[in-house]
Structure formats: structure tokens, C-alpha cells
Image: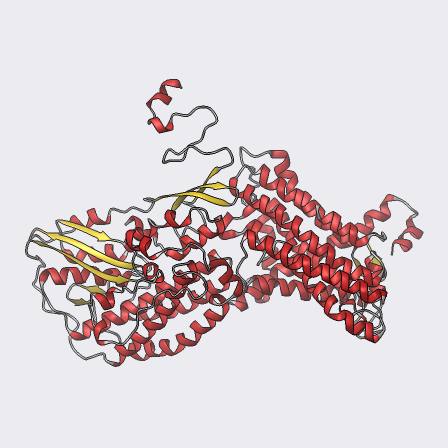
Amino acid sequence: MLNELKTLPTNYVTTPGEIHTSTGKTLRTDEMIINMGPQHPSTHGVLRLEIVVDGEIVVDVIPHIGYLHRCFEKHAEYMTNYQQVIPYADRMDYLASMNNDWAYALTIERLLKIEVPQRVEYIRVIMAELQRIASHLIAVGTFGIDMGAFTPFLWAFRDRERILDLFEMTCGARLLYNYIWIGGLSHDLPKGFVEKAKEFCTYFRPKLKEFNDLLTFNEIFIKRTANVGVLPKDVAINYACSGPVLRASGVDWDLRRDDPYGVYNKIAWEVQTGKGEMGTVGDVWDRFIVKVREMEQSVRIIEQALAGLPEGNVQAALPKRIRPDAGEMYVRTESPRGELGFYIISDGTGSPYRLKARAPAFVNLSVVPAISRGCMIADLVAIVGSVDIVLGEVDR
Amino acid sequence: MQELLKSFLGDNALVYIIMGVPPLIFILLYALVTLYMEMKVSAHIQDRVAYMRTGWHGVLQPFADILKLIQKEDIIPAQADKLLFTLAPYLVFTGTYAGFAAIPFSEGYIGSNINLGVFYIVAASSIVVAGLLMSGWASNNKWSLLGAMRSAAQIVSYEIPSALAILVAVMITGSLNLNDVSKFQEGGLFNWVVFGGPLPLLQKLAIIPFTATAFFILLTAGIAEANRTPFDLPEAESELVQGFNTEYSGMKFAIFYVAEYANMFLVSAVAVCLFLGGWQSPFGSALSGPIWGVFWIVIKGMAFVFFQIWLRWTLPRLRVDQLMYVSWKVMTPMLFVCVFAVGLILVL
């Protein structure tokens, strides 16, 4: 027994009665360690948070990740061609597959230096924005559950169902689409899609207002979220946060506008930032309202894109085998969770030499310990919910 | 009813046992109905239809649920304190069930006609706290422990506003026996305590704002004591997994559930007896009598149970410190004002 103890790292050598966290910090007598997850209703997947609590107050949070690691990057290197990576990219952020596909396809297209037809660009924008609404609906809905309100969650799912129906109509799949391909799309929009999508836009606006009445401007909800988990501007930038988390802290930064791709620069829409209406800029409520307002903007984008949808081909002329010249490329796009980038090194063969995905959820998660020290357990749940992580993307 | 039984059976223990049976039957039936109601109400709030397959519109589903829970393996965690773990759900249920003894279901039926009825209910339902604390501690689970600590803090602090609100009604009616309190409110809707009771008109008008406030606070505190949303912190699903009953399964879990539902009715019934005439008909002497009495109190009670269900599926949950804030800094001072004002008006 004593010999076993000696082999442990020094910070684990215990004197009787002493307890350490996994980072080696010794606990005071009135503190206790609780494992929140990997099986816990509000960690949004298999995230494990090791939290040190003093009664209800959170003293420290140590996130442990990797429970859903599927070797995406290594898999990508061993595919026989670039096209085969797309289904794996689908499975990264499984709530925003379209955006993942697009980011990956865009990287290869830039690497190949090919232009895609205008129709493809428009359809991609429509799909990505529909996906953004679907993803944000889950984010705000599950955040409602974190706050103890169950009904908004099911309302959000009801509306998301309509979007999934649209996707199913387009490509047959409801979650992992494999629709956006390198140089184009797997196939054109089906008949009647445009009308159905327009119908969805008119359906969704009043529903969003209803949702706001039920949850967003509820007094208890505001009391629970305002001034909680404040993420100041400089901290957000230092932790390389992106997406709604960054914008909620008052940073006016959206890659759809600031590093344009697709046809976003031909469409009128506004970047939403947190203004601290209910409390401080960058609190949980701001992170929530930014997502809600982005949904409104997405509806605007979809309507314009549908109106401007040109006729044409949905596949650019591609070489028979995709073999980009040796070189490297980093392309960043705005996924619902933030800056989703793919860094690909090509050695001239049919599969990437190295592929690195810059996952926004992973980066955003890293800020959680910094903003949740000293809050209560209920606030920690709110903070984790507001950062909107998808473990499929955190672990890849 | 007690006198009637005594005349048949003589004054022995059997009488009291028989007197105890109707509330138990009522609780079990009521739990089934409320289980069904909760599922259906929540479903319609959420744009769903809930059960449709077990019987007409799924009316048999509660039976299926209970059957499932009975069949389930009764797991006791290896490191748990077996005795306390087993005892806790029964203690929680006992506390609630004991409260039903002093509820007059009609003029002719009250489980135990003690003259300190309300006081007894407040005391008996305090046993629930001990049961919850026991379950959380015995589970040997940190989440359960946190849930139990929360529930103890919550129920103890909400007993104060609820006791003060009860005091407001008791000052007007002059009795702690809920049957007498109900009798006092004879003569239709406007003689209920929430409308000032059968007092002279001027006094009545002056007293209404305070009685209405007290009634509303009693109802809110009742929701907190029954651990329902927005005060469901002890079992806050998204924070504490299932709170104090995380480790419970099978029949023990079902007993917690029944106790929670029974508690919902108990707090509603107390509020109804004190402020809404109990078994009195709202139409004066029309539709009143011992049998109608049962109907009225159950209907009034169920209306507030429905209200609690409605709130549960609408509102988010408060945080621990906000919960305490509401109790100590909002409700209690308001009730002090109410008690003082009602006293003053009654003396004048």
C-alpha cells in the first residue's frame, strides 16, 4: 500500500484526511468535490465538470473533456479522397451539420481555387441560416430547461421540427445531411422547397415572439440570468471566444460580415451584440438574447436569399479526382457557435496530409472556469448552458 | 361520522382506524387523477397530446405507471444507510397523510376533530422536512445531500409566512379548528374569509385587501412547501439531477411522488378551508349538505392543484438566495402588515 502511494505524482501524496482536486489543489475542510457529469442532465452531453463547492458556492471548476472523442482529424487523414471526409465533418457539431459541411467544402474549394455557381452560394446560405435557427432553437430551448422551464424547450423543438422537415425534403436526412459537397451540392432543391421555406419564415416570426413572452422577458428568468456569469470584453478576447458568446460581451465581430464568404455581403442584415439591457454587458441574459435576435436576422437572410435565388447548375466543374496542389489553407466561417475553421495541409495526394478543425465550442468552453468562480451551483448551470457547447464538437 | 361509528362500535381503536381510511383512499385516487391531469395539462401547454393509447385518451396510463413502479427492482445503494434510506419515504408520506386528519372534507367528516386543527397541520407537515433530510443524508450521494439541505432550508423558511397567513384567517374566524372555520363562512361566496368573512360591510371592505394578500401568500408558500416549480429547488432536475430522491427507485420513489401530490392537495385544502369557505357552497344554502360539502372542497382544492400544475409548466425556477429573499424580505414583512391591519380593523 505504502509503495503504491510513493509511485503517485507528488501532488497526489496524501496525508490522511486530505482531499485533492485533479489539479492537485488541497481542499479546505468545508469544501467538497462534486462531479457534475459525464451523466448529468444539464451538461449538454458528456462533459464532466469537477466542481469544488463550499455549500452552494462554486469555488472552482475543472472541465474534463474527451468522453466523445472519435479521432475526426486522424480519420480525415486516412480517407481515400477529400469527399469522404464530409460525413465525418457532419458529425462534429451534430446540431449544425450544414455549417460544418460548408466550412469544410469551402476550405477545399479555396485550396483547389475553384468558384462555385451562384445558385449554390444562395442555397448554401439558405441551408446554413436554417441550420443556424435550428441550432439556436436548441440552445435557447435547453437553456430554458437549465433554468427549470420545460415548456419553452418543447416549443423550440416544435419549431425546429419544421426546419428538419425542410432538410428531410431536400436531402432525406434529418440530422446529418452530407448535402453540401465540394464544388456544389449533392443535388438541387426539390420542387416546392422555396414555397415551404417562405411559409416557414412567416410561421416562425410570431412563434419567436411567443417564445420571448414566455421565457425571455419573464421576471424570474431575468432575475436568474442578469448579472450572472459576466464575461468582460477583454476576457472574451483573451480566451479567443467567438460567435454569440463574444458578441454578447459587446464585441461587434461576425465572420459572415467581417470575412465574407457565400453571398452574405449581398444581403442586408445586422450583427447583434449584447448591450446589457437587463444587467451588465456580457452576462448570461445577453448571451441568450443575442441568440434569439440572431434567429430573427437569420429569418431576414433566408427571405432575401429565397427571393434572390438564381437558376443554374448546382455543381461546379471538378477534376475527376480531387488532388489539390501541395500547400495549406485555413478558412474560417461563422457557425452557430462561433468561428469554425478548417486548417488543411495538402501534400498533393487524394487525402489531407493534416487536418485541424478549430471548433468554437471547444474554445468557448475554456472560458467557463474563469467566469464561474464564486457563483452558485444554479448559476454554473446557467453559465454552461449560455456558452452553448456541443460535446460532439468539443471532443471531435 | 365519528359519533355515528362510536354508537355502532363503541369507543375503541377500531373507530379511529376506520376514520383514517377515507383520506388514504382519497389520496391514492387523487394521486392517480392528478398524475393524469399533470401529464395532460403539461402536454396541452406544450403543444403535445400526451398519452393516447392506454385506454380512451390514455386514462389507464397512471395505472400502468404505478404498475411499472411496483414491478421495478427496489435498489438500495451499497454505501447507503439502509435503515434511514428505507424509512425516509414513509416518513415523508406520513407527515403529509397526518395533515389530512384535520381537514374537514364535509360538515360531517373530519378525520380528527381537534380544536387546534391548523396548528396540528403545520406541525405534522414539518415531519416532511425530517424525512427529506433523512433521505438525502442516507443516500450517501452529494447531489441528494445538497437537495436535502435545500429542502430543509426552504420548507423551514416558508413555514413562517404560511403560519402568519394562517394567523390572518384565524384572527377573523376566531378558531383553529378547520371545521369551525368553514362553518363560520356560511352564507355564500361573499362570506368567505378572502372577502372579509361575514362582517359588517364597511369592515369587510377595509379588510379585503389584507385577506386577499394573505390568501395569495399562503398559496405561494404552499407551493414552496410542496416543492413545486418555481420553488422546486430540492429536486431541481437540471442542477441536482433529482435532488433528494436521486437514488430512489421503484415503490419508494412512487411513495415520494404520492407524498408530493398529496402535499399539493393538502396546502390547497388548508388555503381553501381558511379563505374560501372549505366545504361551503358558493351559493349559500343551495347545493349544500354533507355530500355536496365533499364535492365543493375537492373541486376548490383541485382548482388550486390545477393552478400549481399550470405554474409548474410555465415558470422557470428561482435560485436559492432568491427563494430566501422572497420568503424573508417580501412575504414575511407583508404579512406582518396584514396581521397588524386585520387586528386593527377587527378591534375597531
Q: How is the image coloured?
A: secondary structure
Name the one closer to the observer, A100 or B75: A100
Q: Can residue A18 be seen in the rendering of this structure?
A: yes
Which quadrant would residue B144 be assigned to in this image?
Answer: top right
Count of numbered marks: 0
* Image x and y of residue B239, in percent: 49, 50
Quarter placement of the N terminus of chain A: top left
Name the one closer to the observer, B151 or B294: B151
Left or right of B292 in this view: B250: left
Left or right of A255 in this view: B288: right
Left or right of A243 in this view: B245: right
Q: Residue at image x 67%, y 42%?
A: B130
Name the one closer to the observer, B325 or A139: B325
* Image x and y of residue A90, in percent: 26, 58
Q: Residue at image x 35%, y 60%?
A: A249
Q: Residue at image x 82%, y 63%?
A: B172
* Furthest residue toward top: A2
Q: Can residue B58 be seen in the rendering of this structure?
A: no
* Image x and y of residue A357, in percent: 22, 53
Image: A139 above or below B186: above
Q: Residue at image x 56%, y 46%?
A: B147
* Image x and y of residue B300, in percent: 72, 66
